[in-house]
Image (cartoon, rainbow, N blue to C red):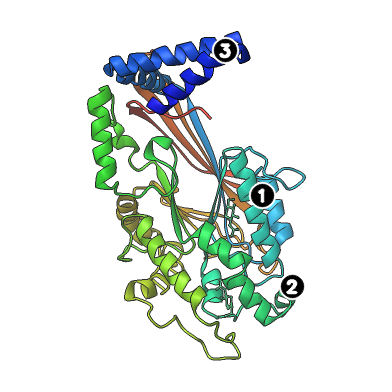
Amino acid sequence: MTLYLIYTLKLHLFIPAMTTWPTQRQIITELTTFARHKLWPWTTDADQFEKELEYQQEKATRMPFSRHIVAVGDLHGDLPNARRVLRFSNVIDDSGDWSGEVDFLVQTGDIIDRGDDTILLFTLMENLRSQAAEVGGTVLSHLGNHEWMNATGDWRYVYPSELKTFGSIAARQRMITTGRIGRAWAQNYTTASRLPLHPSIGPPNTAYPPTSSALHFQKEDNLDFGIGYTDNKAMSHAALSFVHGGLSPSYPELTPFPSRINELSDSLLAKLQRRPQPPPHPPHPYPGLPQGTTVEEARLYNSNGPLWYRGWAMEDEETVCSQVDAVLQKTGTRRMIMGHTPDFHNIQSRCNGKVIIIDTGISHAYGGVLSALSIHYTLKPVGDADSQRWIEKEVVSALYSDRQEILASDEREVVGEFWHDES
Ligand SMILES: *[C@@H]1O[C@H](CO)[C@@H](O)[C@H](O)[C@H]1NC(C)=O
Ligand SMILES: *[C@@H]1O[C@H](CO)[C@@H](O)[C@H](O)[C@H]1NC(C)=O
């Protein structure tokens, strides 16, 4: 700072002829502020505090908030059908680009196998991801059991014609491990996600239960500004979970959610991608998980893990509805959404939309029905300007090419300060 002062003084005292009047005035303002901060250091804090307060007050205004989420299940190598679904759910426009009409697109895995368009579909997803990011949208992508099967060298469901689109077995191996697709999996795909309905919970994949440092931060905020999250209990579970298969009630790695599952997912994928690629099964023997796979990593990939579990789709209503609340409670969510177990006619909603299964066999390999799930969330202020009352609403609908069906519509009043940045 002292250097800066000397430098500025030199430049502008000794070559005044070269500077114009507005610049000189700006320099004088800068210098006096600088001098003031040097002489009376507490004025620096005061200036900053004023700015911060203005910012907080602006944020705290009672603005209505809305968030629109679209989720799409198993796509299995069929680009034209994937495009149709994304078009009628308004995720993309007529030219196939991100429309900006939705805030989140979630895909629950199984893009690969049973069709020829693997490369094109993964490319489409990366294009949409970057287009979305430019306008504040987000694409959340998940690895399904078929992506994992491929990563383990289990090629039972690879179509010979799909193999041709890669050129050769070796080319497919390369692309899916160290190549473009494998890198996208490692960077931009997870096995589980937690998507907040309202930003006061945090960005996507904020872990539940909150870590102690987050709690600490919130407490300090309360002290500083006297406004807080004390009434926020109503919102603590205002989030959705997504995995490919399902979150089994007896899966031991549910919390913290989704970070525990995604840690195991990252480490297992890295081990699979780093090992020398085994020759594809069949005709070669099933290679299994790599040496050095931990017990927890192996559990991620077994039939009770989030990639393969089918209980939420297969068990009877009474069993499902008696088990669901415990899992929602643990994972900090209100609904769990998954693919993997197809129903060729409808998206399945169970226990008043607490469990939603969105695999409807979209790929022509199944000849199911084209579908997407839509969730409209709104939080609107009610009462007078000083009131802290809000109406919270979630409308969950199944979208088909020719019709829409409301699966759940929940409304409740919540009390508290709920901030969001205008964007
Ligand atoms: C897809 O299968 C091949 C053959 O085993 C394998 O080399 C590749 O690693 C798999 N994909 C990924 C992402 O690892
Ligand atoms: C992952 O997503 C980011 C953001 O869209 C993108 O820049 C990056 O290239 C993607 N990674 C891969 C390997 O595709």
Give the x, y percent position of residue 244: 49, 62
Assess disc 2: are there few (<14), some (14-19) or many (≥20) residues with their C-alpha within 10 Å of its C-alpha.
some
Give the x, y percent position of residue 292: 37, 80
| Mark 2 C-beta to ligand 1 under 8 Å | no
Q: Nearer the viewer, residue 335 or 316?
A: 335
198 w.r.t. 248: above or below: above
Looking at the image, tell me whether mark 3 or mark 2 is earlier in sequence order: 3
Give the SS element for disc 1.
helix
Give the SS element for disc 2.
helix
Looking at the image, tell me whether mark 3 or mark 1 is earlier in sequence order: 3
Amino acid at the residue labelled 2: Thr
Residues marked 3 and 2 touching at CB (< 8 Å)? no
Give the x, y percent position of residue 374: 56, 44
> Of the numbered discs in the image, which one, if any, rests on residue 16?
3
* Residue at x 38%, y 75% (from the top left corner): 298
Residue identifier under label 1: 86
209 w.r.t. 232: above or below: below
Residue identifier under label 2: 165
Give the SS element for disc 3.
helix
Q: Residue 1, can we see it?
A: no
Looking at the image, tell me whether mark 2 or mark 1 is earlier in sequence order: 1
- Give the alpha-carbon distance from disc 2 to disc 1, as whole Å: 23 Å
Give the x, y percent position of residue 102: 59, 40
Q: Which quadrant does ligand 2 occupy?
A: bottom right
In the rendered image, the residue lying farthest to the front is: 14
